Amino acid sequence: MAFAGRRRTERLQTLALLLRAVPIGEADLVVTFFTEERGLLAALARGARRSAKRFVGLEPMHLLRLALDERPGAELGVLSEASIEHPRLHLTSNLARLEAAGRALRWVRDIAPAHTAEPEVWRELNRLLDELDEAPRRGPAEADAPALPPDAALVTTGLRLLGAFGWGLDLSRCVSCGRACAQGTSALADPARGGLVCRACGGGRLLLRAELRERLAAIAEGGEGTIPLDDLRTAFDLVEGALTAHASGR
Ligand SMILES: [Zn+2]
């Protein structure tokens, strides 16, 4: 019967990142994942709190492989298997890196549309987590020192996530009147409005030095570039402010 056919559950197999786990009832968890195949989705993990062995892979930061059953129209899938496909143990043993990675995962959790594959976001998020997982390159005495400040890596990812979601910052012209910003000049930016806002249009709360503005634009385009340490705070405020402006409040 067609009606029965529509209600059949479908097995989804996908790589995934764990974004959140919320206890429900006596023994279960509602887990939110960002998946390669289906973007953001939530599933019920039955018995996950009764036995840690039930889903050994249910940990954040590592690349996970999942199998879950989805019924068309149902809000929650049912998790049937979870395993760690690729562990990220350097990342999970360093607090600064964990905080940076956690922030990026929250951005995606708050912004990504449900049940929509986002290949660019998937790639960028995993690229960041792999970068934060790189073994320290210095001597054993500095084993905790990351290869680069985690916040710099986070700014790069934030800029690219904005582009991937279609909200790329405009760092070359005023978002209000469209007037181009002359090369080599500093400019005011309003993250919530998506880029530069010239003084005639009210300006913005962040002052971007010319060099920073150009580096941010290059990174957003996918290029390499480092953000001067002195500018990191401003760059982070810009990216965080722009991403937060698009958060749904989930
Ligand atoms: Zn303007």
Image (cartoon, rainbow, N blue to C red):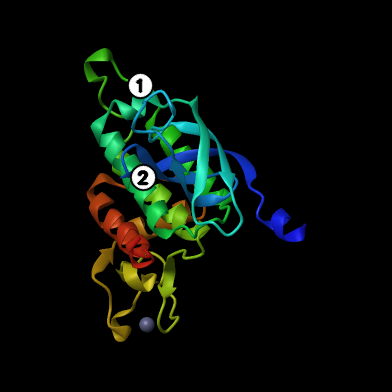
> Residue drawn at (42%, 84%), measured in percent from left and top?
177
Q: Which residue is denoted by mark 2 in the rendering?
A: 20
Give coordinates of residue 99: x percent, y percent. 27, 40
Give SS at disc 1: loop
- Residue 237 in the figure: left or right of residue 133: left
> Residue drawn at (43%, 27%), measured in percent from left and top?
54
The image shows residue 178, relative to residue 220, as above or below, that is below
Query: Circles 2 and 1: CB distance less than 8 Å?
Result: no
Q: Which residue is denoted by mark 1 in the rendering?
A: 137
Of 52 and 221, nearer the camera is 52
> The N terminus lies in which quarter of the figure?
bottom right
- Residue 218 in the figure: left or right of residue 73: left
Q: Quadrant of residue 148?
A: top left
Give coordinates of residue 86: x percent, y percent. 49, 26
Q: Amino acid at mark 2?
A: Arg
> The C terminus lies in which quarter of the figure?
bottom left
Sequence-wise, which precedes: disc 2 or disc 1? 2
Q: Amino acid at mark 1?
A: Arg
Of 20 and 172, nearer the camera is 20
